[in-house]
Amino acid sequence: MIRDELKQTPLNDQQVMMLRLLKKPLPQEDFLQMQRLAVKLLAKQLDRTIEDWELQNGMVEEDYEKLSRGHFRVSSIDKPL
């Protein structure tokens, strides 16, 4: 399954380098630690992206408070058929 995915998806230089670094299988605990670090890095990148979006759109905490008190459901009466 993973081999099929690799055949269909061209890898960039960074991805190829990571694969070369990980050519030899790691102990499970080391692999899990690397996986956690990768997720942590991606979460930081997502936080930065959200912060940039908030700055660009003038979002402040009060906006989130308002959104949390509202709802987005549409009643069946208001729904077009």
Image: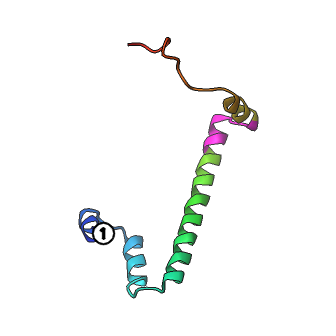
Please state which of residues 31 and 74 is positioned toward the viewer in this rendering: 74
- Is 32 left, or right, of 52 in this rendering? left
Could you say which is closer to the camera, residue 40 or residue 68? Answer: 68
Q: How far across and down, in percent of the image, does residue 38 sit? A: 53, 68
Q: Is residue 1 magenta?
A: no
Q: On the rendered structure, is 25 left or right of 35?
A: left
Q: Is residue 52 above or below residue 2?
A: above
Q: Left or right? Give the position of 65 relative to 27.
A: right
Picture residue at 68% right of the left edge, 33% below the top? 68
Determine the image quadrant of residue 41: bottom right
Quarter that holds the C terminus: top left
Which residue is painted at 52% across and 76% down in the image? 32
Under mark 1, the amino acid is Ile
Label 1 sits on a secondary structure element that is helix
At 39% from the left edge and 71% from the top edge, which residue is drawn? 15
| Outermost residue to the front | 76
Q: Is residue 75 above or below residue 18?
A: above
Closer to the camera in the image, 70 or 7 = 70
- Figure coloring: rainbow
- The residue drawn where x is 73% and y is 33% is 65
Which quarter of the figure has residue 58?
top right
The percent position of residue 51, horizontal first and vertical second, equals: 65, 47
Give the quarter of the image for residue 23: bottom left
Q: Residues within 10 Å of mark 1 (few under 14, many from 20)?
A: few
Q: In the image, is residue 80 above or below residue 33?
A: above
Q: Which residue is mark 1?
A: 2
- Look at the picture and state if 62 lies above or below 1: above
- Report the magenta residues as a range: 53-61
- Quadrant including the N terminus: bottom left
Q: Position of residue 13 (x, y in %)?
A: 38, 72
